[in-house]
Amino acid sequence: MFHTIFYEPLYNLLVLFLNVTPMHDVGTAIVLVTCVVKALLLPINISAMRSQHALKKVDKEIKKIREAHKKDPQVAGVKMMEIYKREKINPISSIFAILLQIPIFIALYLVFSKGITADADSLYSYVTFPETLHTYAFGILDVTQKSIIVGILTGITAYLLARRQAKDMVIEESKKGEPTFQESFQKSLKVQIVYVFPVLTLFAAAFLPSAIGVYWITSNVLGIFQDYYIRKKHLNR
């Protein structure tokens, strides 16, 4: 099922772009595939950011409910769901947006890790693999090989995207002096998102075929513009 739902559509989309790009350039084809994937995920990401923004607005109300019903979490849950319904918040939309990107990334990794070769069993009947293929993206980068430069660029773009996405994670300091578990967890999560994840991304991209890094860099750059667009167009920020 994974092969049919994720791998085959992405593989055939890549091959289609390889057929129409000048010189059958792999780099250009990867950028175009990334743009299509981002466009398809845009409605889901808009919904996720709207929910995050709405959750932030009702955060104090949610905290009061949790505090008032410490000993009865079921009542707290019901009251919180009432708030979500009133404000039209989908609390799991952000998780869904993240989870959906995991199989897409795995599928793209499988496509690129094979060296972008003709896979007759996965090609649709109306798609033909180009007779000649230039594995040098933009004429300078062999996407079948690993590259430390691609890894560094991936890490930098991942950091810039993470900083934008994490700037809404405002952590309120406890008035009691001693930080609560939730505050400590939020601080730790923010550090991991902004610093640890980009470093891990850098090393991963540096030791994987450069095609993965080209996809990652393109995705990160588009993610930055997408974040700016959603904030200005849909959140008025």
Image (cartoon, grey):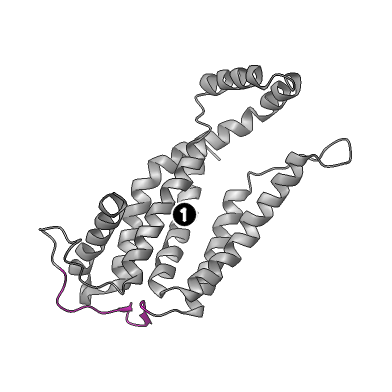
Can the viewer see residue 234 in this picture?
A: no
Residue drawn at x 22%, y 65% as measured from the top left? 15
> Which of the 4 image quadrants contains residue 33?
bottom left
Query: Which one is in front, 58 or 114?
Result: 114
Q: Residues within 10 Å of mark 1 (few under 14, many from 20)?
A: many
> Which of the 4 image quadrants contains residue 28?
bottom left
Residue drawn at x 35%, y 61% as measured from the top left? 108
Query: Which one is in front, 91 or 8?
Result: 8
Asked whether, in this view, residue 120 is left or right of residue 197, the answer is left
In the depicted structure, whether residue 193 falls above or below residue 19 = above
Asked whether, in this view, residue 29 is left or right of residue 50, the answer is left
> Which of the 4 image quadrants contains residue 72?
top right
In the depicted structure, whether residue 139 falls above or below residue 199 = below
Q: Secondary structure at mark 1?
A: helix
Residue lying at the far bottom of the rendered structure = 140
136 drawn magenta:
yes
Residue lying at the far left of the rendered structure = 126
Instruction: Give how far across and how far down residue 149 sits, in percent.
Output: 50, 78
Residue drawn at x 40%, y 58% as measured from the top left? 105
The residue wearing badge 1 is 223
Query: Which one is in front, 110 or 51?
Result: 110
Residue drawn at x 17%, y 61% as measured from the top left? 123
Q: Main secondary structure of the magenta part?
A: loop
Q: Which range is magenta?
A: 129-144
In the depicted structure, whether residue 219 falls above or below residue 74 = below
Instruction: Give how far across and how far down residue 138 sits, in percent.
Output: 33, 77
Instruction: Give how far across and how far down residue 27 sits, in percent.
Output: 33, 72
